[in-house]
DNA sequence: TAGTGGTCTAGACCACGAA
DNA sequence: TCGTGGTCTAGACCACTAA
């Protein structure tokens, strides 16, 4: 009952959510009829509230037994970000900006960003280190029209947080991954042997229907492994 | 009305589904009150039917306007399979079994399959080609206890189809991807230069709570790129 | 103004699980 | 037997959209 003006099914839902968050999986939730009495609402209203929590994956109904806290569903599919992956290993992720400027999109970047060649893009190149050791070199290209004043506002620590603040949090990404050898420039920046394999990771990040970001990252393969977690269909 | 014995909300749902599949996104679905009259049911029953289709992503409600065919949501996250990727390029995917036998799990495989070292596993090694050219070498390990008679029944064309038939379709996978150079054996089988980079792709495929399959695949990087499509959280 | 989906009521009967 | 969730009814009022 966080808000008297709230819709009843929302009140019930949030009440149950507050009871249930933190409970062990398998713990019983209040029965529907109990909530009917507590809130003085119809059972359909309670069911609407519970339905939302079931769809959300928080609760699980067992006919004839009751409603219970569901075991947490696996996290949504994702590729770990550089910062996350370093954190997992207990390393400090650092990042130095080599380039942050407005450019005209070349043919490849224009196509990937669904723009026309020559349109303005923001090019942001970073060398990322873990505990001071170069790990990867990332070139991100952003659609400037969607990010007015982005360069002037100072470069953020986290690109995705900055996008989030502008309501441009990507909800979908298409990644391609291959192995290669580094170019001389890349080898120099990554301080690695030019003959050693590297991992190339390209991403198109999409929010709604708009392509927000295109990035190309080259990782030192001897120091980095990409992790992907996938939920399959149906 | 595919089945007179079916629950009413199921009848309504399947009726609407049959109307709607194949319709262009944005086409109107029948209004709730129209379905109330057509089926002679209460509006809550119709709403239950429509709710399911909305959650499924087939329909989209717009208050004050109506219910419409939703634009197809992007497919669930996935890594393209070898066969798919070859099909996309118009190449014929082939596969020759180099090994298919019962083994005792070594320490790495045992841990990955959540077994104990020495437990029985099925080891299936395949060399996969596209238009006759070697592309990758795959070692799959399966928990033998979950797949009785698997080796005796003849190796299937598609592993995942075979798992599906046994109700062991993976619903979750954890993948790791890195770049490396091939071992001499791998270079020989892949007919590639031992100094050239390869892509290593490891997978743990999980159905329910059981680890079904662990695989390690090495791709010729000059001929293969992994594609990953990801839906982010909320 | 008429139609739509969003919310809500106050009941009802059923199948199923546990005691 | 009793409590549970699953299904279903026959209405109601609301806010919103479109004509």
Image (spheres, coloured by chain):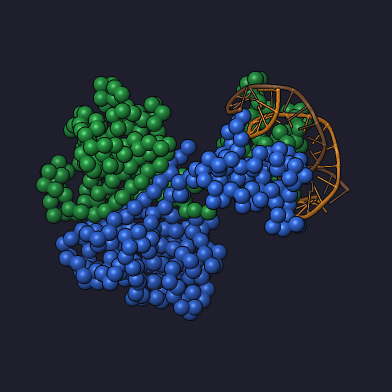
Chain colours: A green, B blue, C orange, D brown
Q: Nearer the viewer, residue A54 or D14?
A: D14
Count how many numbered circles sit on residues in the image: 0
Residue occupying image coordinates x 30% and y 67% = B130
Q: Nearer the viewer, residue B74 or D3?
A: B74
Residue A12 seen in this snapshot: no
Image coordinates of residue B216 in percent, x first then y, are: 34, 62
Image coordinates of residue B7 in percent, x first then y, are: 73, 52
Image coordinates of residue B196 in percent, x first then y, are: 18, 60
User: Where's the N terminus of chain B, which quadrant?
Assistant: bottom right
Q: Is residue A18 above or below residue B167?
A: above
Q: Nearer the viewer, residue A32 or A120?
A: A120
Q: Is residue B27 above or below residue A16?
A: below
Residue A224 seen in this snapshot: yes
Q: Nearer the viewer, residue A91 or C1?
A: C1
Q: Could you tell whether B84 is left or right of A215 in the image?
A: right
Residue occupying image coordinates x 22% and y 41% = A107
Q: Is residue C16 above or below residue B39?
A: below
The quadrant holding residue B219 is bottom left
Image coordinates of residue B161 in percent, x first then y, are: 48, 66
Residue occupying image coordinates x 23% and y 43% = A108
Residue occupying image coordinates x 35% and y 33% = A160
Q: Could you tell whether A168 is left or right of B221 in the image?
A: right
């Amino acid at each position: 009952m966080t808000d008297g003006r709230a819709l009843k099914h929302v009140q019930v839902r949030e009440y149950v959510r507050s009871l249930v968050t933190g409970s062990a999986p398998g713990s019983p939730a209040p029965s529907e009829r109990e909530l009917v009495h507590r809130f003085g609402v119809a059972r359909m209203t309670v069911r609407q509230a519970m339905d939302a929590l079931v769809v959300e994956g928080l609760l699980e109904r067992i006919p004839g037994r009751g409603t219970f806290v569901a075991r947490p569903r696996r996290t949504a599919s994702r590729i770990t970000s550089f910062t996350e992956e370093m954190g997992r290993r207990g390393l400090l992720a650092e990042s130095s900006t080599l380039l942050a400027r407005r450019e005209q999109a070349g043919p490849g970047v224009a196509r990937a960003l669904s723009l026309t060649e020559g349109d303005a893009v923001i090019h942001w190149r970073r060398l990322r280190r873990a505990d001071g050791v170069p790990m990867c070199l990332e070139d991100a290209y952003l659609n400037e029209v969607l990010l007015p004043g982005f360069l002037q506002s100072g470069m953020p620590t986290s690109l995705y947080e900055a996008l989030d603040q502008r309501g441009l949090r990507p909800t979908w990404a298409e990644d391609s991954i291959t192995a290669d050898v580094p170019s001389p420039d890349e080898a120099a920046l990554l301080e690695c042997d030019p003959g050693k394999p590297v991992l190339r990771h390209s991403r198109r990040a999409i929010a709604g229907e708009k392509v927000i970001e295109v990035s190309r990252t080259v990782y030192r393969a001897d120091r980095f492994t990409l992790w992907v977690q996938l939920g399959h269909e149906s």
